[in-house]
């Protein structure tokens, strides 16, 4: 009985060792890019709320990628337009792409990326110009369907995002009493050198 157990144990050890070849340590498969949902990011205050895609959180350092203030979204690249804006220390830029979030799988052409400038932001402001439309009857701000923003991050990586809601807890039908300036958005961050999402 002991001999049979010993033979089975040795066989299992040989099979396990064979399956753990040195090739497994050289696996260069690029991990799949995951979509992350950010809920209730507060941009209702006077100061900009800075967000890092790589850290997936609001940050207070210079390592931010985009920043929110009311309906304005800026990128960490370009020229500071107003005194209330954070200093841009990165090389960030944005390309606005039409399509669904899932359909944007390749980086746009380099020429389509723009930085914030003194005349205009990379993500245009105002109803119907950038990411939202404003209904003057209901006074509700709604994301424009089919607007995806591909961001060159402050350190040269890439991310894409879409705004889902401008109201706390992302109500399906916001009302005038809904708390505004509270973003919900999806993003996907590509930390590798691949050119796809």
Image (cartoon, grey):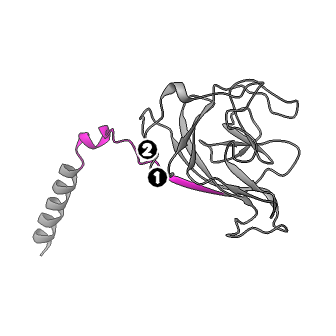
Task: Name which residue lies at 18% across and 50% down.
Answer: 18
Quadrant of the frame with the N terminus: bottom left
Residue position marked by numbered label 1 in the rendering: 102
Q: Is residue 194 left or right of residue 73?
A: left
- Foreground of the two, 30 or 127: 127
Q: In x, y percent, where is residue 116?
A: 71, 29
Can you give x and y, in whole percent of width and height, for residue 91 in the image? 63, 25
Q: Residue furthest bottom?
A: 1
| Quadrant of the rendered image containing residue 65 | top right
Q: Residue at x 55, y 43 (%)?
A: 160
Disc 2 is placed on an element classified as loop
Query: What is the total number of numbered labels drawn onto the structure image?
Result: 2
Mark 1, other Cα within 10 Å: few <14 / some 14–19 / many ≥20: few
The answer to whether the residue labelled 1 contacts the one labelled 2, judged by CB atoms less than 8 Å apart, is yes
Residue at 70%, 69% in the rendered image = 171
- At mark 1, the secondary structure is loop
Q: What residue did someone put label 2 on?
A: 105
In the drawing, does residue 8 fall left or right of residue 95? left
What x and y, as percent, mark residue 38? 64, 56
Q: Which residues are magenta?
A: 20-38
The front one of 27 and 41 is: 41
Say if the magenta span includes residue 29. yes
Where on the picture, by quarter, is residue 178? bottom right
Quadrant including the C terminus? top left
Q: Is residue 14 magenta?
A: no
**At 74% across and 30% down in the image, what residue appears?**
120
Q: CA distance from mark 1 to mark 2?
A: 7 Å
x%, y% of residue 105?
43, 44
- Left or right position of 152 against 135: left
């Amino acid at each position: 009985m002991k001999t049979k157990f010993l033979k089975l144990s040795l066989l299992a050890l040989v099979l396990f060792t064979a399956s753990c070849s040195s090739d497994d340590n050289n696996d260069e498969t690029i991990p799949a890019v995951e979509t992350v949902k950010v809920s209730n990011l507060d941009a209702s205050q006077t100061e900009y709320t800075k967000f890092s895609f790589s850290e997936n959180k609001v940050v207070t350092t210079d390592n931010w990628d985009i920043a929110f203030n009311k309906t304005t979204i800026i990128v960490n690249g370009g020229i500071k337009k107003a005194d209330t804006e954070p200093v841009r220390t990165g090389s960030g830029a944005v390309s606005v792409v039409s399509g669904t979030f899932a359909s944007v799988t390749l980086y746009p052409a380099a020429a389509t990326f723009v930085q914030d400038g003194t005349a205009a932001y990379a993500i245009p402001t105002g109803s119907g110009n950038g990411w939202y439309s404003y209904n003057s009857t209901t006074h509700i701000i709604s994301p424009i369907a089919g607007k995806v923003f591909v961001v060159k991050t402050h350190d040269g990586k890439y991310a894409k995002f879409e705004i889902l809601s401008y109201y706390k807890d992302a109500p399906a039908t916001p009302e005038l009493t809904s708390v505004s300036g509270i973003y919900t958005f999806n993003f996907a961050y590509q930390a590798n050198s691949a050119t796809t999402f």
